[in-house]
Image (spheres, rainbow, N blue to C red):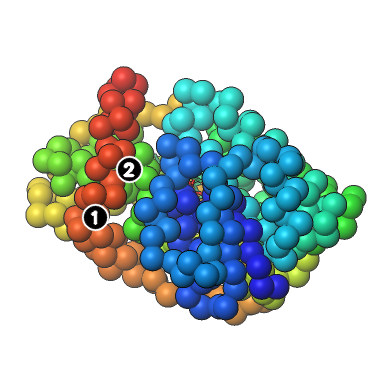
Amino acid sequence: MNSYLVTGGAGFIGSNFVHHLLSCTDATVTVLDKLTYAGNKASLDGLPADRFRLVQGDICDAELVDELVRDHDVVVHYAAESHNDNSLSDPSPFVQTNVVGTFTLLEAVRRHDVRYHHISTDEVYGDLELDDPHRFTESTPYNPSSPYSSTKAGSDLLVRAWVRSFKVAATISNCSNNYGPYQHVEKFIPRQITNVLDGGRPKLYGAGLNVRDWIHAEDHSRAVLRIIEAGRIGETYLIGADGEHNNKDVVEMILELLGRPRDDYDHVNDRAGHDLRYAIDSTKLRAELGWRPEFADFAAGLKATVEWYRENEAWWRPQKNDTEAKYRAAGQ
Ligand code: NAD
Ligand code: DAU
């Protein structure tokens, strides 16, 4: 398996995977990305020109997808509309890209018998109570809450059906909340860091007691490559790094790292249908494939992420004003 087609490779996690793949294998990579508001060519700077190319296009374009899939050994599917708040204001692109786009890729890998890995999220399992002793596992029933998570759940179910009915050689991974460099400023951690760098205040939805299970994007990339190389066809693997923190604690850590008082934040309107807690049990991935997170210390990973945004204003500045204008209009 030496030629990879990576969809959504100009986004946050997809670009991290492309850098990882090209640095630790001799593979060649084609990125297929529509370059929506969330895609950024600059996240792919510095890659070896003889082993990498970017094709700007839509995963719903069946002709283009067919041509590209035919010429590759593996498809790794990251492309998606990924932000819950956007899915509440306009669900339509989420149904199109996440469901129809996945269908389009599955039909192409079926026709050309190409290995497929599907990137998904822990949000397909719904949420947990704060004191629930159980975490999500591969056998937790699907129970998505938002337009975003329901379209991701739908795409996962398409993959499962294509494996069973058409013997497509696919694996699925469901990962928890990623953080690290190159994440769009609409997302929680970069939004708060860049608000503070701009002299403003972090914005906490509701009371800030919602819990997310944080994992560094590099640990996610390492897990995905391990699954592609050694995972069992037809299987799902959950990816998580035991990184549960509530939003209020994360905001306080960011304020402290940037030398501001820990209570220097605003409470803003809560998200409709806001999931309370996500938590992943990644025993299967660890026991079967020997994966372990390298960024086990969330505080250290967050500190490095804060530094990255401090040093890379040119990367995030063009997205900041439009993003904050949307949030202001929603009282967030
Ligand atoms: P992102 O929004 O940063 O990037 C998405 C990329 O997909 C962008 O480059 C965008 O241009 C591209 N894209 C969107 N629609 C497209 C289309 N129709 N055709 C081609 N390209 C298109 O997202 P992300 O946070 O990097 O997430 C990537 C994947 O990982 C998604 O499938 C998401 O569901 C999943 N995931 C994300 C997280 C997280 O914490 N961010 C956690 C688990 C799983
Ligand atoms: O769990 C995996 C998912 O993580 C991925 O599938 C999604 O693509 C990704 O966007 C992320 O979803 P969340 O909704 O958990 O992430 P977000 O960064 O939007 O918000 C994280 C938490 O922070 C959530 O509880 C909402 C809250 N929040 C968010 C923003 C933007 C705030 O309190 N204030 C904010 O300004």
Above or below residue 69? Residue 57 is: above
- Direction right: furthest residue: 165
- Does the rendering let one see residue 150? no
User: 219 left or right of 1?
Assistant: left
Mark 2 and mark 1: span between their CA atoms?
A: 12 Å
| Residue marked by disc 1 | 312
Q: Residue furthest front?
A: 50
The location of residue 232, given as percent across then percent down, is 75, 70
Q: Earlier along the polypeptide chain: callout 2 or callout 1?
A: 2
- Rate crowding at label 2 as few (under 14), some (14 to 19) or many (20 or more) other CA atoms within 10 Å: many
Label 1, ligand 1: CB separation under 8 Å: no
The residue singled out by tag 2 in the image is 185
User: Which of the 4 image quadrants contains residue 96?
Assistant: top right
| Picture quarter with the C terminus | top left
**Tag 2, which secondary structure?**
loop
The answer to whether one can see residue 34 in this image is yes
In the rendered image, the quadrant that contains the N terminus is bottom right
